[in-house]
Image (cartoon, helix red, strand yellow):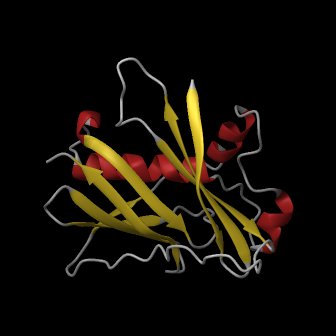
Amino acid sequence: MVTGTITGIYDKGSGAVIATEAKPSTRPPRPDLHDAHVGVYPRRGRFGGDRGPSGRVEQPAGAPTTRHLRHTSDQALLYACRRPQPAALGPQVRASAGSTNPSCTAVQLRLHGAALLHTLCESDPDRFVSMAARFSKPVFRPDPHVNIWETGDGTAYFQTLNEAGDVVIDAGQGVYKL
């Protein structure tokens, strides 16, 4: 059984954001297992609520490790077909952003998780604790690249850029065991 909780409803002006958290009921209890999700609802803002956290993260100084994220052009479509609800952006959204390729946040997050796992944890999943990020623009093919800054204390920050150099995923944070 999973218990879901709304942890925040925010008015961003141009849209609303609803933050939720899901925790499984396990025996024995496992506080390390939980899922946080943020839903964005365009054109549903301006209701006078709290703006909520900004999600901005200061990137550490120094040169990052750069990873090129590679996936096949049908990866998002295959993922979407296996899900009971739509997981990829529809053709109208893709066309309005100037792309015909499917984009899927879950595929992007999987690719980022893999990049962090291999860069920070030497491919050992037992060392991977968590990751969080903010999509600032739609991510389409060609493949983006991610810059990862390690702090040395079990936390890393990451930011993803598209081929044009635009930031498409920002405020990324990965936590891992040293």
Q: Residue placed at 64% from the left, 50% from the top?
A: 73
Residue 18: where, in percent of width, then height? 65, 60
Q: Is residue 176 above or below residue 147?
A: above
**Residue most extreme to the top:** 27
Q: Is residue 48 above or below residue 36?
A: below
Nearer-the-camera pick, 20 or 98: 20
Residue 14: where, in percent of width, then height? 73, 80
In the shown orientation, is residue 94 left or right of residue 3? Answer: right
Numbered disc total = 0
In the shown orientation, is residue 159 left or right of residue 121? Answer: right
Residue 87: where, in percent of width, then height? 71, 46
**Residue most extreme to the right:** 92
Residue 164: where, in percent of width, then height? 54, 80
- When asked about the image quadrant of residue 52, the answer is bottom right
In the shown orientation, is residue 60 left or right of residue 137? Answer: left
Nearer-the-camera pick, 137 or 26: 26
- When asked about the image quadrant of residue 101, the answer is bottom right
For the N terminus, which image quadrant? top right
Q: Residue placed at 45% from the left, 56% from the top?
A: 69
Q: Residue placed at 33% from the left, 56% from the top?
A: 174
- When asked about the image quadrant of residue 168, the answer is bottom right
Q: Residue placed at 35% from the left, 19% from the top?
A: 28
Q: Is residue 127 above or below residue 156?
A: above
Nearer-the-camera pick, 65 or 129: 129
